C-alpha cells in the first residue's frame, strides 16, 4: 500500500474532501498541498538565512476543515514534526502552554502561517528525524504530556486498519471526532490511503444539520465514541433507514453491553457491519477489533489484535499468562507503538525503544483467544478489605437500573415522539430516565453518579424529586443483593450532566474531585513523597509528577472548605495536568479578605504581612499542621545551604520583635523560624533599634573562630548593621559566616543597592561572609526560594515559580520579564498554594544551574510599576 500522505494525485478525480459547498478532488488536494509546502519551505529557509531548514516543529490549529487537512499533509510531506492545538478564539494560541513547552517554529491556523519561535535567538533543541506527530494522551491540548508518534507508527497503523475494515475508494465518511484525537485522525488517514471521500464538518451528531449533511452526501461509514452512541440510541438512530450506510465503528472507551447489542441487532437487520475496536493514543489509534459476526455472542469482548500485531496478558511479576480465563494486565506489541512520551521540546531527540506497551487495563482471554477488559489498574479500590473494580461495578449499575425499572432506560427529547416508551418500575410508578452512569470511589465509600434528564425540573417538581429518591433507594437495594456491598458504603447522586473529556470519555477525575473531594490523608501521602528527596534534587519531569498531584489536592481542599476561593476559581475545573494550568489568586486579595479553609477553633497562629498605605495588613491563618510543615520545609531547604549542625546565631533585630511582644508579624515569624537553625542566640539591636556593639563584639569574640549564622531582613541588615558599622569603621571576622537575608528594601528603596554591592558590603563588615538571599512572603508561608552560590534564586521540590506576561497573564518564556507566580505544597489552612504576586522577575533556566541544584532558577527584578511598596516584614519609620 502506498503511504497515505504521499502521491495524492494517484486517485486523480476521486473526491477527497468536502467542506460545505467546497469539493476537492485528490488531484486538487495534492496541488494545494504542494502550494502550502512551497510557502512553508520559503518561510523556514528565509528564517534560517538560506540554510537547510532541517527538522522543525509546526503547530497546527486543528479543526475539521480543508485548511487543517492541507496543513497536516504538507507538514507530513515536508517531514516536519507536528503538534496540534485547538481553540475557538484566534488569540488562544498565544496563551497555550504547549507553545512554551515545545516552542514550535510556526503556527499554522487555517490559511495563516504565524511565526512562533522560528526567529528565536535561543538555539532550539533538535528533533529526531523520525518524529512525525505529537498527540495528547487525553485528546485535550490543555495537557503538555504528548505521545510522540513516528512516520512508521502512522503508516503501520493505517495499513493494519485497512486490512480489516472494509474501506474502499467509493466510500464517503464524515467527521464526528476532533482532527487531533487519535481515533479521529486514524479515520482521516485510512480514507486518504484508499482514495475515499471525507466530509469535513464541525457539526455535532446532535444537530439536525449534521444529519442533513449525512444524507446529502450519502455517507457510507462513520465513527463514534461511547457517548456518541449513547446519544444516537436515545435519538432513535436504530429506527432510521440508511441504505447508503455500509458500516460504522466504535472505539474510545467501553460502550455498555446493552447498547452494543442494540447496535449489533440494528446492523444485522439492515445488512450493515458494526465494528467495535479497542485502542490507545500510545498505539497510534487501534490495537484490537471484534469481527461483526461475534458481537451478539460476545458483546463484552474487545476481540483480537489488529493484523501484524500482538496482544498478551502479564501477571504482577511480568510473566506472560498463557491460560484462558486468568486475569492480568494487557500488553500490546506492534510497529504502531509510540516512540515515547514528551513534555517539552528537549525530549524529542533521544528515546529508549519501547518494545511492548503496558496498557494499564486488566482483562482476560477466553478459549477462542478473544480478550475481555474488566477494568483499569487505577480504577480498583479496596472497600472494607475487598478488591472492587469500579469499572465492573459501573456495568453492574447499568444492569441494576434495567432490573429496577424493568425496561431499558430511554429519554424524552424534543424531536422524539411523546408516545415513546417510558421507564416504569414493577409498582407502575414512573422513574426518571437514566442516560449515563459513572462510578467513583475509594477504600471507604462508593459513589454512583446518575445523569438524569429530569434533574433540571426536580427543584420545582415534587413528583420528579420523589421519583429520583425512589430510584436511588431501589438501586442501592438491588446492588446489595448482587454485590454484597452494604448500602451504607454506597451513595447515589443524580446530576444533569456527567462531565466528559474532549474525546468523549467520562472525566472521572473531575467527578471524584467534585463529589469525593480529597482527604487530608491523600494530601499528606502525596506531600511526603515530595519530602523524601533532597530539597533541590528533583528535575523537571520528576517534580511535575510529584508536585502536580499535591497542588491538585490543595485546590480541591480549598474549593471544598474556603467559599471565597471557590467563588474566585469557579470556572477553573477540578483537576489539572500541569502547574501552569492551575488557577491562581492575586496576592492583594489577602489584604482584602481573610481567606481561610479551617474553623476558628483550628487556628493555631496568625501571621500579619506589612500594611501598605490605605490597606490593612494581610492576616494569614495557620493551623498546627501547616505551621509544622512550614518548619519542616524550612529545615530541609536551609540545611542544604548551611548544613545540619546548629550554629551560633546573630539576629539583626531586637528581642522585642523576635518574641512578638508588639504582635506576631511576618518578621517575627521569620526570626522564630530561622532561630531553629541557631544556638546561643544574640540580638544585635536594642529595643530602640540602635546597634548593641558590645553584644556584637562579644558574639564574634566567642564564636568567630568557627562557622556562624547571621540572619536579618535585607533592609534591617543594611540600615542597622552594615551602614552603622561602615560609618563607625567597624568590622568583624569569622571563619565562615552564613548571612541569610530576605524581604527586600521596603520603604528604604532610595538606599537600594544591587546584589553584588550588597554582598561586597557584607564581606567588608563581616569578613568570611557567604551571603544567601531568599525570596518569600507571609502569604506563601514556608516555601522560600533560596539564593545559591552563583546568585540565583532556586525553587525547591515543594514549591515552584512561573513567570506570566503582565498584559495577558500567559506563561512567559525563559528569559522574559513578567509577574512572578509562586506555588507551594504547604498550606492546607488557607488557599496560598498558588499566588500571583506583584513582583517582576524572570526565569534564568531549569535543571542546569552551575550549582548543580535541580529545578527552576530565577531572579527578582522589582515591583510592578505603580504598585505600592509592600513586603513580608514590618518597616520601622
Image (cartoon, rainbow, N blue to C red):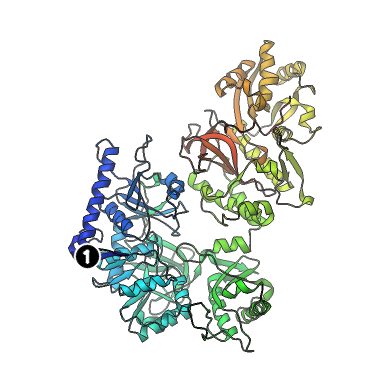
Instruction: Please provide percent x and percent y for residue 391.
Output: 53, 71
Instruction: Name the residue rendered at 73%, 45% in the picture.
Output: 621
Instruction: Please provide percent x and percent y for residue 737.
Output: 64, 23
Q: Quadrant of the C terminus?
A: top right
Instruction: Name the residue rendered at 56%, 54% in the picture.
Output: 572
Residue 562 in view of the camera: no
Q: Quadrant of the N terminus?
A: bottom left
Looking at the rendered structure, the number of numbered marks drawn on it comes to: 1
Relative to 837, does residue 165 appear above or below in the rendering? Answer: below
Residue 869 in view of the camera: yes
Q: Residue furthest front?
A: 21
Tell me the SS state at disc 1: loop
Relative to 314, does residue 417 appear above or below in the rendering? Answer: below
Quadrant in the rendering for residue 742: top right
Instruction: Please provide percent x and percent y for residue 72.
Output: 31, 55
Q: Residue furthest top?
A: 729
Q: Residue furthest right?
A: 661
Mark 1 crowdedness (10 Å alpha carbons): few <14, some 14-19, many ≥20:
few
Relative horizontal placement of residue 666, taking residue 81 as reference (left or right): right
Relative to 764, does residue 308 appear above or below in the rendering? Answer: below
Instruction: Name the residue rendered at 50%, 70% in the picture.
Output: 375
Instruction: Please provide percent x and percent y for residue 715.
Output: 66, 25
Viewer-closest of 875 and 516: 875
- Please name the residue that numbered disc 1 is placed on: 1
Amino acid at each position: 500500500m502506498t503511504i497515505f500522505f504521499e502521491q495524492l494525485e494517484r486517485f486523480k478525480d476521486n473526491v477527497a474532501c468536502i467542506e460545505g459547498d467546497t469539493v476537492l478532488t485528490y488531484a486538487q488536494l495534492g496541488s494545494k498541498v504542494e502550494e502550502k509546502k512551497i510557502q512553508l519551505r520559503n518561510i523556514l529557509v528565509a528564517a534560517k538565512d538560506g540554510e537547510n531548514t532541517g527538522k522543525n516543529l509546526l503547530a497546527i490549529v486543528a479543526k475539521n476543515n480543508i485548511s487543517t487537512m492541507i496543513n497536516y499533509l504538507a507538514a507530513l510531506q515536508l517531514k516536519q514534526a507536528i503538534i496540534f492545538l485547538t481553540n475557538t478564539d484566534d488569540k488562544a494560541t498565544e496563551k497555550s502552554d504547549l507553545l512554551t513547552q515545545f516552542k514550535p517554529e510556526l503556527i499554522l491556523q487555517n490559511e495563516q502561517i504565524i511565526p512562533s519561535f522560528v526567529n528565536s535567538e535561543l538555539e532550539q533543541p533538535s528533533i529526531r528525524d523520525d518524529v512525525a506527530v505529537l498527540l495528547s494522551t487525553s485528546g485535550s491540548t490543555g495537557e503538555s504530556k504528548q505521545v510522540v508518534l513516528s512516520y512508521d507508527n502512522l503508516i503501520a497503523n493505517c495499513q493494519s486498519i485497512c486490512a480489516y475494515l472494509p474501506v474502499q475508494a467509493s466510500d464517503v465518511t464524515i467527521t464526528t471526532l476532533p482532527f487531533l484525537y487519535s481515533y479521529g485522525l486514524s479515520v482521516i488517514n485510512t480514507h486518504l490511503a484508499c482514495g475515499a471521500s471525507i466530509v469535513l464538518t464541525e457539526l455535532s451528531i446532535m444537530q439536525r444539520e449534521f444529519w442533513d449533511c449525512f444524507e446529502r452526501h450519502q455517507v457510507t461509514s462513520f465513527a463514534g465514541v461511547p457517548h456518541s452512541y449513547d446519544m444516537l440510541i436515545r435519538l432513535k438512530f436504530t429506527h432510521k433507514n440508511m441504505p447508503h450506510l455500509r458500516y460504522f465503528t466504535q472505539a474510545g472507551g467501553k460502550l455498555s453491553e446493552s447498547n452494543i447489542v442494540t447496535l449489533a441487532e440494528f446492523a444485522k437487520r439492515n445488512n450493515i457491519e458494526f465494528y467495535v475496536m479497542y485502542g490507545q493514543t500510545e498505539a497510534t489509534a487501534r490495537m484490537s477489533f471484534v469481527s461483526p459476526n461475534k458481537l451478539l455472542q460476545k458483546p463484552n469482548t474487545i476481540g483480537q489484535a489488529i493484523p501484524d500485531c500482538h496482544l498478551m496478558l502479564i501477571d504482577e511479576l511480568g510473566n506472560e499468562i498463557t491460560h484462558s480465563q486468568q486475569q492480568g494486565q494487557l500488553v500490546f506489541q506492534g510497529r504502531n507503538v509510540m516512540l515515547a512520551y514528551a513534555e517539552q521540546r528537549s525530549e524529542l531527540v533521544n528515546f529508549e525503544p519501547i518494545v511492548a506497551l503496558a496498557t494499564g487495563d486488566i482483562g482476560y482471554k477466553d478459549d477462542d483467544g478473544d480478550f475481555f477488559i474488566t477494568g483499569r489498574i487505577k480504577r480498583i479500590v479496596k472497600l472494607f478489605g475487598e478488591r472492587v473494580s469500579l469499572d465492573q461495578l459501573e456495568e453492574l449499575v447499568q444492569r441494576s437500573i434495567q432490573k429496577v425499572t424493568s425496561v431499558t432506560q430511554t429519554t424524552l427529547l424534543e424531536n422524539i415522539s411523546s408516545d415513546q416508551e417510558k421507564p416504569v418500575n414493577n409498582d407502575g410508578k414512573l422513574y426518571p430516565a437514566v442516560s449515563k452512569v459513572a462510578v467513583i470511589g475509594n477504600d471507604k465509600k462508593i459513589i454512583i453518579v446518575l445523569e438524569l434528564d429530569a434533574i433540571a425540573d426536580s427543584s420545582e417538581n415534587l413528583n420528579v424529586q420523589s421519583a429520583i429518591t425512589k430510584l436511588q433507594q431501589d438501586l442501592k437495594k438491588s446492588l446489595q443483593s448482587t454485590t454484597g456491598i452494604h448500602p451504607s458504603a454506597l451513595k447515589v447522586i443524580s446530576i444533569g450532566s456527567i462531565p466528559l473529556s474532549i474525546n468523549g470519555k467520562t472525566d472521572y477525575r473531575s467527578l471524584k474531585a467534585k463529589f469525593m473531594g480529597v482527604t487530608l490523608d491523600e494530601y499528606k501521602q502525596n506531600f511526603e513523597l515530595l519530602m523524601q528527596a533532597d530539597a533541590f534534587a528533583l528535575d523537571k519531569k520528576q517534580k511535575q509528577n510529584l508536585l502536580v498531584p499535591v497542588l491538585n489536592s490543595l485546590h480541591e481542599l480549598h474549593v471544598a472548605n474556603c467559599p471565597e476561593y471557590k467563588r474566585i476559581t469557579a470556572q477553573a475545573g477540578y483537576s489539572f495536568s500541569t502547574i501552569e494550568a492551575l488557577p491562581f489568586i492575586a496576592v492583594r486579595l489577602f489584604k482584602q479578605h481573610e481567606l481561610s479553609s479551617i474553623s476558628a477553633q483550628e487556628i493555631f497562629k496568625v501571621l500579619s504581612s506589612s500594611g501598605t498605605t490605605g490597606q490593612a495588613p494581610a492576616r494569614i491563618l495557620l493551623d498546627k499542621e501547616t505551621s509544622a510543615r512550614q518548619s519542616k520545609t524550612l529545615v530541609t531547604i536551609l540545611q542544604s545551604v548551611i548544613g545540619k549542625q546548629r550554629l551560633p546565631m546573630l539576629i539583626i533585630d531586637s528581642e522585642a520583635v523576635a518574641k512578638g511582644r508588639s504582635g506576631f508579624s511576618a518578621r517575627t515569624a521569620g526570626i522564630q523560624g530561622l532561630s531553629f537553625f541557631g544556638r546561643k542566640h544574640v540580638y544585635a539591636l536594642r529595643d530602640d533599634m540602635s546597634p548593641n556593639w558590645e553584644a556584637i563584639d562579644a558574639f564574634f569574640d566567642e564564636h568567630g573562630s568557627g562557622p556562624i549564622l547571621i540572619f536579618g531582613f535585607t533592609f534591617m541588615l543594611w540600615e542597622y548593621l552594615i551602614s552603622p558599622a561602615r560609618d563607625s569603621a567597624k568590622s568583624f571576622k569569622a571563619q565562615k559566616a552564613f548571612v541569610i537575608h530576605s524581604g527586600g528594601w521596603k520603604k528604604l528603596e532610595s538606599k537600594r543597592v544591587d546584589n553584588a554591592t550588597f554582598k561586597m558590603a557584607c564581606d567588608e563588615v563581616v569578613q568570611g561572609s557567604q551571603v544567601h538571599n531568599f525570596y518569600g512572603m507571609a502569604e506563601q508561608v514556608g516555601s522560600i526560594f533560596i539564593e545559591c552560590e552563583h546568585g540565583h534564586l532556586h525553587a525547591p521540590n515543594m514549591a515552584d515559580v512561573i513567570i506570566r506576561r503582565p498584559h495577558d497573564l500567559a506563561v512567559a518564556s525563559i528569559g522574559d520579564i513578567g509577574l512572578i507566580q509562586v506555588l507551594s505544597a504547604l498550606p492546607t489552612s488557607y488557599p496560598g498554594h498558588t499566588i500571583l504576586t506583584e513582583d517582576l522577575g524572570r526565569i534564568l533556566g531549569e535543571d542546569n544551574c552551575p550549582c548543580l541544584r535541580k529545578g527552576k532558577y530565577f531572579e527578582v527584578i522589582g515591583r510592578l510599576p505603580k504598585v505600592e511598596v509592600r513586603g513580608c516584614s514590618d518597616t520601622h519609620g
